[in-house]
């Protein structure tokens, strides 16, 4: 998939220059004194049937981007098209019929499932909201979904807290699938789970994708998991994408300095491998007052950082289907000449 | 000194709960040699943290107790020494690093004061000298502008910086052993790499031993000399790190290693999983607990399997069913 796909086709979801800023208020009159630029000009697309992995460190804006894509947040600027339809400024009422097509699965199933509702009620709630089927049909659908995600049908009468973490995540997935969506936004779906349970949930997600032709936006910080699940991967740093390419290209031929640093930081579960690590200094800078130029160049104290202030750092195609930020601090000399 | 720095023999740690006593750690034995790093790995609830906290008696009180066994540190049983001596050991000869630095640091005291307190508890120096030492330590663990940071509060620091402060507090008394409980789990990978690099450097400079508790097999592979794998309150396998990854013998260890997606594994392939789930702690059998999970009956259904030493230093819980299964896969 991925690279071989027909790019003429309209992508399922297309985002242009999306910005999601949150006001920071202060002073006596609670005037806006600053803005958290959580997402600051992101363009990407998700093709039908593919998984786009989104990686980055905490605070880089990846969860906010996920929520803005499905309009759980109202973007500050930019454009979101779902199957060619502009949903950027649509009202929540207008969006309701479209919500059938895209659903979200959250990180912590304990927090995203209502503990006062039975599992059956949780899974059928989207059907009730979408006014789909009558009571009996909905019950039938719940049973079908429980089969699908590998839970016993008797689970419908129980409460979510009676289940383990992995089972709760299955409930979350069943709820998201209830309305037959085309796209699932998976926000760190396995990061709260132990590795053996994580593998079960990942296998389930792959099986569902194969059987139902789903598209995924897979948000995670675990790069091993993202590589396993994704066709293409987007790397995010401080509100911006720095590299987007096929999963193989990202892992085997990363071009951006941040992608390289991120990859070298993952501990490899093989004691015979000894790698040269890039140890970064400092922390991810605050999105409240991001550096004016290259954010990662600033973190690395790059000698040519000043030159990037005011420069267009948008994505450029460096190889077929391989996009990288046009950032002189973060590219090799050879790559920089290609995009200069 | 003869013998290992730390030797744990058959410890049993229990908690009182509403439903009676539960044995969170059920007969665990291993050693940590001076200067070596031993990894303690397992999934949540397997008893790895309880094992570590039993060593320094930092169990939640009054519910948690070490009921049986010996904890020999430099040849003396820590279970038998007086509370005063234990306090000297804890923080002095054994430093502890916790997962969540915000919960371990005192939020209302300045960083400097917390370091000074640790230094002066174990060393007779003036407050001024201790403060100077505190600044030096902050510098050693890579905190920029340590003279300024020393008078800040924990909330003013980022997660990675707080973990560095914790490390400074743990190291400032030159301990012989560091117990690090998931020291990087709450951190991002690039910050995790910084912290592990720092711990490695410090270990090299000070020659201390480390007991590293983690669920991340990648961290184990990179940091440890020896690995102890725990399942349901017991050790299932123990081996030098290369042996364990190259030749895992217990079905649980194999399952654990097979279930991690690796950067070099085939994308979107089906991951190996471990069927079933860990029994609830009240229902733990006396017999082989992995067989209990797999719903298998066998020789060790009711009796605890003995440990077998396969090659020097490579121990496995000797349940034939768990050792046979999946062999060569």
Image (spheres, coloured by chain):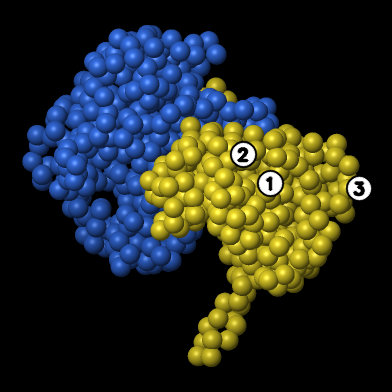
Chain colours: A yellow, B blue
Residue A8, numbered label: 3
From mark 3 to mark 2, how far is it between C-alphas?
27 Å
Number of residue marks: 3
Image mark 2: chain: A
On the image, which quarter does residue B249 sit in? top left
Q: Few, some or many C-alpha atoms within 10 Å of disc 1 (few <14, some 14-19, many ≥20)?
A: many
| Mark 3 or mark 2, whichever is nearer to me | 2
Closest to the observer: B190 or B112?
B190
Describe residue B100's horizontal placement relative to residue A60 as left or right: left
Q: Position of residue B170 (x, y in %)?
A: 32, 47
In the rendered image, which residue does mark 1 sit on? A216
In the rendered image, which residue does mark 2 sit on? A205
Tell me the SS state at disc 3: loop
From mark 1 to mark 2, how far is it between C-alphas?
9 Å
Q: Position of residue B301 (x, y in %)?
A: 29, 16
Instruction: Check the image and report above or below for B297 versus A251.
Output: above
Instruction: Check the image and report above or below for B55 versus A124.
Output: above
């Amino acid at each position: 998939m991925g690279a071989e796909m027909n790019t003429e086709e309209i992508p399922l979801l297309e985002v242009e220059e999306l910005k999601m800023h949150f006001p920071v208020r202060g002073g006596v009159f609670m005037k806006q004194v600053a803005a958290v630029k959580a997402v600051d000009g992101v363009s990407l697309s998700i093709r039908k049937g593919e998984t786009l992995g989104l990686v980055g460190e905490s605070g880089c804006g990846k969860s906010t981007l996920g929520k803005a894509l499905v309009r759980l947040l109202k973007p500050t600027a930019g454009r979101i098209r779902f199957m060619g339809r502009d949903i950027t400024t649509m009202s929540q009422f207008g969006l309701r019929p479209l919500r059938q097509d895209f659903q979200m699965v959250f990180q912590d199933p304990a927090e995203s499932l209502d503990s006062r509702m039975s599992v059956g009620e949780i899974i059928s709630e989207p059907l009730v909201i979408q006014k789909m089927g009558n009571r009996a049909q909905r019950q039938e659908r719940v049973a079908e979904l429980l089969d699908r995600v590998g839970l016993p049908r008797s689970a419908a009468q129980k409460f979510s807290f009676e289940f383990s973490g992995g089972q709760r995540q299955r409930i979350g997935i069943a709820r998201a699938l209830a309305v037959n969506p085309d796209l699932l936004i998976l926000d760190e779906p396995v990061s709260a789970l132990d590795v053996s349970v994580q593998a079960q949930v990942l296998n389930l997600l792959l099986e569902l994708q194969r059987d139902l032709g789903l598209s995924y936006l897979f948000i995670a910080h675990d790069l091993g998991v993202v590589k396993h699940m994704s066709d293409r991967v987007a790397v995010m740093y401080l509100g911006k994408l720095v590299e987007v390419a096929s999963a193989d290209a990202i892992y085997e031929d990363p071009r951006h300095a941040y992608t390289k640093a991120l990859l070298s930081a993952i501990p490899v579960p093989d004691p015979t491998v000894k790698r040269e690590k890039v140890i970064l200094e400092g922390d991810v800078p605050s999105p409240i007052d991001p550096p004016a130029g290259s954010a990662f160049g600033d973190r690395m104290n790059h000698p040519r950082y000043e030159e990037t202030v005011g420069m267009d750092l948008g994505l450029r195609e460096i190889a077929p289907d391989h996009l990288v930020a046009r950032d002189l601090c973060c590219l090799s000399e050879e790559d920089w000449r290609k995009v200069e | 000194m003869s013998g290992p720095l730390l030797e744990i023999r058959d410890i049993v740690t229990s908690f009182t709960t509403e439903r009676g006593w539960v044995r969170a750690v059920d007969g665990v034995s291993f050693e940590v040699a001076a200067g070596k790093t031993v990894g303690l790995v397992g999934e949540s609830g397997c008893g790895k943290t309880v094992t570590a906290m039993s060593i320094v008696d930092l169990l939640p009180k009054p519910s948690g107790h070490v009921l049986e066994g010996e904890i020999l540190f430099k040849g003396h049983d820590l279970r038998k020494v007086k509370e005063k001596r234990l306090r000297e050991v804890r923080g002095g000869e054994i430093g502890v690093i916790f997962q969540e630095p915000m919960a371990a640091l005192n939020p209302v005291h300045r960083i400097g004061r917390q370091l000074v307190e640790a230094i002066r508890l174990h060393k007779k120096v003036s407050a001024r000298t201790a403060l100077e030492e505190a600044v030096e330590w902050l510098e050693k663990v890579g905190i920029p502008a340590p003279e300024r940071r020393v008078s800040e509060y924990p909330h003013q620091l980022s997660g990675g910086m707080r973990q560095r402060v914790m490390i400074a507090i743990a190291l400032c008394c030159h301990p012989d052993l560091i117990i690090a409980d998931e020291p990087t789990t709450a951190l991002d990978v690039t910050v995790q790499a910084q912290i592990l690099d720092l711990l490695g450097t410090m270990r090299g400079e000070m020659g201390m031993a480390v007991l590293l508790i983690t669920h991340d097999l990648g961290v184990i592979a990179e940091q440890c000399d020896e690995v102890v794998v725990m399942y349901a309150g017991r050790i299932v396998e123990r081996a030098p790190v290369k042996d364990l990854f190259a030749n895992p013998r217990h079905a649980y260890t194999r399952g654990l290693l097979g279930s991690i997606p690796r950067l070099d594994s085939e994308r979107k392939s089906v991951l190996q999983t471990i069927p079933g789930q860990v029994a609830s702690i009240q229902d733990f059998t006396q017999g082989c607990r992995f067989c209990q999970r797999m719903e298998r009956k066998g020789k060790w259904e009711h009796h605890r399997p003995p440990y077998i030493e396969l090659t020097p230093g490579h121990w496995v819980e000797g349940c034939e069913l768990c050792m046979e299964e999946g062999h060569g896969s």
